[in-house]
Amino acid sequence: MIDYKELRIGSITKQGIVHAITYNKGKFGCYLHSHPFDSSGGEWFDMSDIDPLPITEYESETLLKFGFKEGLRGNYLLECNGEMFRYWLNSYFPKERMLFVVGKMKIECDYIHTLQNIMFVLTGKEL
């Protein structure tokens, strides 16, 4: 389950891409699309039914779609606004595997929607 405060329009979850966040009959929920160019209203999900999408080796293609370039040993690099960002997928040390490094700042980042939020806050750009 994801806290509704962590989601924004365009956030990627296991169930789909957030199109709208709503409050109806005392519950928060989201309309989700299966792909970014879906022009329908989307399918409504209760927040308790929305799961985060972990960043794993299998989701590394998403990092590439976001503009990261594949480096050595599980490193993915992105230059944005004159800053170099590095995402490290370390399969040898699972506890350190999902570490987002920005210059000298290290931020644990396990999920795609969290990475999207961090990048927006730091750069003002959507992934």
Image: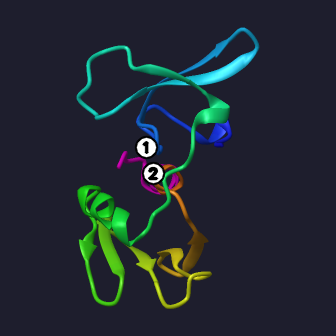
Q: Residues within 10 Å of mark 1 (few under 14, many from 20)?
A: many
Q: Position of residue 1 (x, y in %)?
A: 65, 43
Residue 123 part of the magenta segment: yes
Q: Position of residue 24 (x, y in %)?
A: 66, 11
Apparent side of residue 85 relative to residue 51 in the rendered image (left or right): left
* Residue ID for mark 1: 12
Q: Which residues are magenta?
A: 116-127
* Residue ID for mark 2: 116
The residue positioned farthest toward the right in the image shown:
26
Q: Residues within 10 Å of mark 2 (few under 14, many from 20)?
A: many
- Vertical side of 1 occupied by 20: above or below: above
* Residue ID at (37%, 14%): 41
Q: Amino acid at mark 2?
A: Gln
Q: In the structure shown, which secondary structural element does the residue marked by tag 2 occupy? A: helix
For marks 1 and 2 on the same chain, the one whose residue lies earlier in the sequence: 1
Apparent side of residue 16 relative to residue 22 in the rendered image (left or right): left
Q: How many labels, in total?
A: 2
Q: Position of residue 53 (x, y in %)?
A: 48, 52
Q: Quadrant of residue 114?
A: bottom right
* Residue ID at (58%, 82%): 96
- The CA span between labels 1 and 2 is 8 Å
- Here the colouring is rainbow
* Residue ID at (46%, 54%): 112
Main SS of residues in magenta: helix
Q: Amino acid at mark 1?
A: Ile
